[in-house]
Every structure is written in C-alpha cells, then in structure tokens.
Amino acid sequence: MRAPDTILPLELDRVGFAAGERALLDNISLRLEAGVRTVILGPNGAGKSLLLRLCHGLLTPSAGSVRWSGAAEGEPVRRRQAMVFQRPVLLRRSAVANVRYVLALRGVPWRRRGPLAMEALERFGLAPLAPRPARVLSGGEQQRLALARAWAAGPDVLFLDEPTSALDPAAALSVEMAVQEFHASGTKIVMTTHDLGQARRLADEVVFLSHGRLVEHAPAAEFFKGPKSAQARAFLAGELVC
Amino acid sequence: MSDLSQALSVALDLVLTLDPQMLGIVRLSVQVSGLAVLLAGLIGLPLGAVLALSAFPGRGAVVVMLNAFMGLPPVVVGLGVYLLLSRAGPLGEAGLLFTPTAMVMAQTLLVLPIVAALARQVVADLWEEYGEQLRSLGVSGVGRLVTLLWDGRFSLLTAILAGFGRAAAEVGAVMIVGGNIKGVTRTMTTTIALETSKGDLPLAMGLGLILIALVTLVNAGVFLMGQWARRRMG
C-alpha cells in the first residue's frame, strides 16, 4: 500500500541544459501530473534522455528549475523516484540480493527484506531465478529484475529510458506488462521510447521534443490522430526530421 | 657443472625432507609478507576507493604519486623505515629495529601503493558503469564505497595477491630493517642473498625453488578464481 500523498506533480519552469556553448535543451516548461502515463517522443538527439535525467535529478539544469510540487520542504524526493535505464546496471550478486540491496537502502528492517524481495520478484515472474547471479541472466530477465528492484523501492514516479530498445519482442512485451503493473498500482510513468507502437500502447499523454525544444504536449489520442506541429507530423510519418 | 647438480640435489633433499631450519625461514617470510599485505589491504582498499570517488584539489597529483610509488625501490623504503626506527629516529624509543615488526612495517609501506593504486583503478572503472544507477537509487558516499569495493571483490583480490607476490619476493627492505638475524629476522630472500654470497648454494637454491613455487601457486589461485568469478558472476 502506497501512502496517498505524493511528490507529484512535477513542474519544469523554463528549463535549459547546455554542454559548453551548445544548448541541448532550451526553455522547457512542463507540468507532469500523477496517474497519467507520459511518453516522451522525438527524433534521435532531440534530448529525450536528457530531459528524463533532469526530471530525475541526475543532472542539474543550467537554466530554470525542476520542482516536485507535492513534496514537503526538505523531503528527500530522490527516495520517492526510481529510474530504469536502457542497459540495466545490476550488482554482482544474486537476483534476490539485488532487490534486498534497495530494501536495505530504504531502511526496511532486515527481517522483512526477504519476503518483500521475493514478492517483488514473483510479481515480475522472476521468483525461480532468485538465487541466480544477476549478471548472467538474459537481457530481458535483467531488465525485469531492474523493474522488480524499482518496485521494491515503492516509488511515486518511475522513469524509464528506452527500456526495451536492447530487447527482443517477447522480452519487450514482458517489460511493457511490467510498466502497466506499475501504472495500475498508482505509480506515475515517465518513459522515453523510439518504438511508436509501444508509445501507442502505453501513452496517456505525449511530450514531443525536437532539437531540444518542447514542440507538443498533448493527450496521446489527440497526438497520434492529428499532431499540430509539422515536426511531429513528419516524425509520425516516419520521415527524417531536420 | 657437477658442483651445481650436486648443490641442486642437496637443495631438493632439503625441500623434500622439510628441513626444520628451512621451514622456519619460509614460515617467517609468509607471516611477515602476509601480515603486511593484510594491513596494506585494510588501509589501501578504502584509500583507493575514496580517491576514485571523491574530488578535491590536488587529487590528480595524489593519483600520479600513488602510481609512481607502485615501483618504489624496496631499499629506499627500507632506508626510510630504518631512519624512522633507529635509536635517533622519531620511533627509536620503541626499539623495533631488527624485529619482524619492523619488517612488516616496511613491507606494508611497500605494498600499500600497489593495493591503493589498483583499488583506485578498479573502483573508478566500476563507477563509470554504476555511477548513474547508484545516484538514481540514492546511495550515499559510504554506501557507494562499500558497494563498489564489494562488486570489485575479485579484481581487488588480484591486487592484494599482486602485493603479496611483491612483498614475498623483495629483499632490500627486509634486509635493511630486519638485519637478517639467524632465527629471528631471516627470510627466504635474505637467506638466498647471504648463502649465495657465502658460496653455500644448496640452501639458497632450495629456498629459491620454494619461493618460485609459492609465487606460482598464488598466481594460479588468482587465475582460477578469476575464471570462476567470470563464469559465475558475469
């Protein structure tokens, strides 16, 4: 059971990010609400992963601010978020020990870690693999383990950065089901993908970026039926966006 | 030539009959170098990890120094510890010169840069891979250190054993601070140096064989463990 309070909504106010002279993200203002699955779309190099890292706090914006509106003053908001990366980074220990690691980090008492870790593994179909070393699992199993680890942390928000781009279709599907599981439990989903089919299946709303700028932020149905901008139309038509 | 082969057969005899004098020498060598490596590991592993994970002015210079000190000449370390422990030195009161304790101190100093520099490299490489994930999970500074040292455990053990190989094989430092006193501070390497200069080859050769066997055994252990770890842990 999650606490009813949440650190959402997330507000970005004129956020910019520059590497040296080059502006990689520019003037992005965005409000992400709880309960809605947000998918960030855009051509390669549009700044999707960068935006995700700025939201999560792995990077600090060079302009503007990222604010968790629901957070009380001084609350450790990082502990209420989780992120799943394109290539999962698992510790050199067993699958179940990887989940226990996060539980320990979140201050769960020693005696409750075992049952909670197994519950998280079971939820993502990993229970039989619990004692196996995490690093020798298949790509899809590793990604599901990364999701189970995120689940154990019980986040308000789950960020996913191209979580299926290195996986075969069956493994990708199991990751999508896992994402739905998070959504159903009330966790806010923010993910990037370059798979438009996946975006159609998962998105409630779309954030469309191009060249580091926010071009559209619209409900998914609206975006896929009739994108307002020329860039988004070209992107959906599978053309090169220049 | 016949002198040499005769010496070799006496040497083999000493080894095979487990000559007590020789065993005593081997035991002291292993104890001194083992203890030195243990201490160097206790200090060097956290030190290397801290160097890999922290940023402070002058960090680059420290890393260069550490890497340079990996090749520290044992006689120079021996001289330094000698000066420290000699009657007139700052630690002269303790009366440690020409004791096994002094030898452990010297070898610890000799091995410490190796362990710390290799640990720094291992932890820095792991941080490349783990950094974003650990920051995402909200792992604190000490937590990062412990996590990375544990995940680098197999590579780090290699570093430790490399340190043991160097300590067991050096002669300069233990000679200077130990004094090569028979039955007290005489190690394999100092014995070999002494007996060779006296022209008494069998004991020197016997100990040489044991030393080579020991170092080979340690390296074989490292190799097998590395293979096992890669297969098992990925």
Image (spheres, coloured by chain):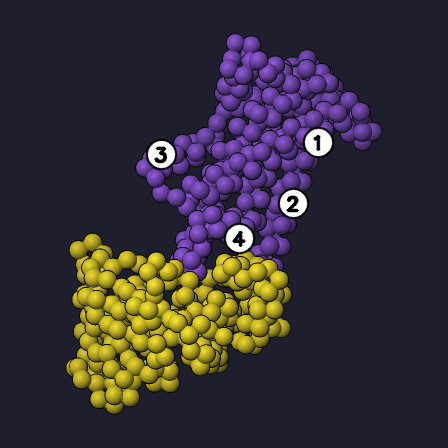
The front one of A39 and B9 is A39
Alpha carbon separation for disc pair 2 and 3:
34 Å
Pointer 2 residue = B221
The Cα atoms of the two marked residues, 1 and 3, are separated by 40 Å
Q: Are marks 2 and 3 in contact (CB under 8 Å)?
A: no
The colour of chain A is: yellow
- As shown in the figure, which amino acid type bears the numbered disc 2? Gly
Relative to A111, A68 lies left or right: left
**Circle 3 residue:** B61
User: In front: mark 2 or mark 4?
Assistant: 4
- Determine contact: label 2, label 4, CB under 8 Å: no
Residue type, numbered disc 4: Asp
Mark nearest the camera among 1 and 3 is 3
Sequence order check: which comes first, mark 4 or mark 1? 4
**Chain of the residue on which disc 4 is drawn:** B
From the viewer's side, name the closer residue of B143 and B232: B143
How crowded pointer 4 is (Cα within 10 Å; few <14, some 14-19, many 20+) is rated as: some
Q: Residue at x 62, y 62 (%)?
A: A111
Instruction: Using the image, name the chain to which the residue with label 2 belongs.
Output: B
N-terminal of the two: label 1 or label 3? 3
